[in-house]
Amino acid sequence: MTKPKTLSFGEGGRGQLLFLTIGLAVLAIANILWGSLDIPVREVWHIVCGGEVEGHPAWSIIVRQGRLPQMLTALLTGAALGTCGLLLQTAFRNPLAGPSILGIDAGANLGVAIVLLFLGGTATIGSLTIGGHLLVVVAAMCGALAIMSLLMILSKVLRSQVMLLITGVIISYVTSSIIQLLNYSATEQGVHSFVIWGMGNFASVGIERLPVFCALSCIGLLLALLLVKPLDALLLGDRYAENLGIRIGRMRQLLLLVTGLLTATTTAFCGPISFIGLAVPHLARLTLGTAWHRTLLPATMLIGANLALVCNLLSTLPRDGSIIPISVITPLIGAPVILHVILRQSDR
Amino acid sequence: MIELQHLTVGYGDRVVLSDINQTLRAGQMVCLLGANGVGKSTLLRTLAGFLPPLSGQVLLQGSDLLTLSLSERSRAVSVVLTERVEVPYMKVEDLVGMGRSPYTGFFGTLSKKDQAIIGEAMEMVGITCLAGRTIDTLSDGERQKALLAKALAQQTPIILLDEPTAFLDFHAKASTLRLMLQLAHETNKTILLSTHDVGMALRLSDALWIVQDGQISTGTTATLTENGALQNFLHGEEVFL
């Protein structure tokens, strides 16, 4: 007689997910309370609840227009980048795949660079003129999708996982060369805004752009959650997945769209942020010990969000009002995780 | 049941096997024999629907393979392929559970019934004790059994296996083939598998399909010996007895 009770089927992990959710709430609150400027906890709470602090009008601006949107941006960016990494690792069946290592955010970079350096921040298509952040997002999206499509085509030819990663690195080099070249023909203002953007910053979204950023990231995250079943099947490879009833072609297009949207959104708004996309899915697997996407994906989102909030707190560590760029902190956290994965692979 | 009517298989302009007319009945386990590159995998890929036939028809349980939707196909044929399945943290029960995909809902959650079917599939193959092990810790033989259990959990009347005995040691080869033969007889499934282990295939199968010179000769070991097809094949190269 069979004993289904002994089987778990990835239904476990509820405890870990709960723990991560609590952690997220704590970190979110800490991100609002903590900043370069010391504001008493009671006053922060008062401001969050809609009040004003007499004699300190700047405090409410800092909390409402600085810390609050910054916290939300970090939270969503972490979740988005982690999700991107997980989707890419499954799609390419490669544990070292991620938006930065495959050159996808380099593609988004190039799109942004063309807009900021070459077009001076506005573009006219027919009678339609797009400017500002919307154009940056569209450009980042075009760049990310172009690289993703190229990789999807190449992955059919390149049998080895390492070759695909090397191709990603080469793509990054080529795009950075093109960006350097663009720098020569750009205005000083353009170069300046590109350099600032390139440092990676959760504060760059701000209260006025927050709704667009939230909407785009949430759409991407929601779409990803709808793909958990075909993602599971893809783990076994294209043929097995097809035999299980998955439309491979359509699935690849959807993955292209979701990862493109998420990478482009985070890159366009916050600049290139490396290692989170690569490391977070592994942290999720380590925490849950499962391969099922229906628990792995929510865990990846939660861990990504937690990690980004930690990075955001760390970035405000200097008490002199200066900020450590996010792109300086993430490799320090991400690299050890990647090393662990590589060592684990070579053990086999 | 699988019926091949004037079936020609190949890739684009390259014809690999032409005008095949064969029938494989339910409850039969048939071994597909032939040298490397002769077209065994191409034929299996075509039967699984991965590759369109160049001409002719494949009838699965009486319906044309090409008219079946992807979801209908996933409930008609299951496969065990040569490609290695390596997924970190995936347990044996998870792998077998994948076989339930064609039946589960939007998020792929397994019902009590699905879980019972997975349990039965693992028991049939004799890997219940491995349920909680991750697949990267399995031996080649155990992994092959887990994939077979996945195919069983898929509950299809037809199972196609591409060289399931490759890389297995002598005992594992024999037990895998014996298991398949038993499954075909006990569960009335149609099982077609390709193999290079001619000696074992002769003893442990209901019939043989010998692929040679673009044609397929079929029959039991006795009939193929009588009409000389087996001797003809054994004189060829790349045969491992």
Image (cartoon, helix red, strand yellow):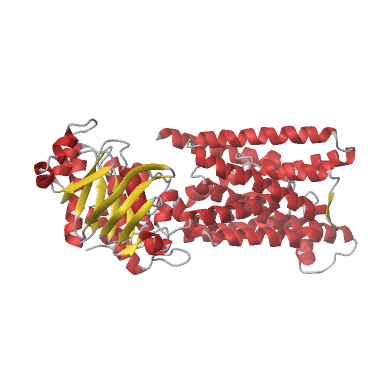
Residue positioned most to the right: A55
- Residue A255: percent from the left, percent from the top? 57, 53
* Residue appearing at x 70%, y 41% in the figure: A327
Q: In this view, does A12 lie above or below B239?
A: below
Q: Quadrant of residue B163?
A: top left
Front position in the image: A196 or B222 = B222
Q: Quadrant of residue A154?
A: top right
Q: Quadrant of the N terminus of chain A?
A: bottom left
The answer, for residue B38, to whether it is visible in the render is yes
- Residue B27: percent from the left, percent from the top? 19, 59
Residue A138 shown left or right of residue B165 in the figure: right
Residue B45 shown left or right of residue A90 in the figure: left
* Residue appearing at x 32%, y 47% in the figure: B43
Count of marks placed on residues: 0
* Residue appearing at x 33%, y 53% in the figure: B47
Front position in the image: B128 or A316 = B128
The answer, for residue B100, to whether it is visible in the render is no
Q: In this view, does A22 lie above or below B223?
A: below
- Residue A104: percent from the left, percent from the top? 64, 43
- Residue A153: percent from the left, percent from the top? 56, 43
Front position in the image: A206 or A187 = A187
Q: In this view, does B151 lie above or below A156?
A: below
* Residue appearing at x 71%, y 55% in the figure: A73
Q: In which quarter of the image is the C terminus of chain A?
A: top left
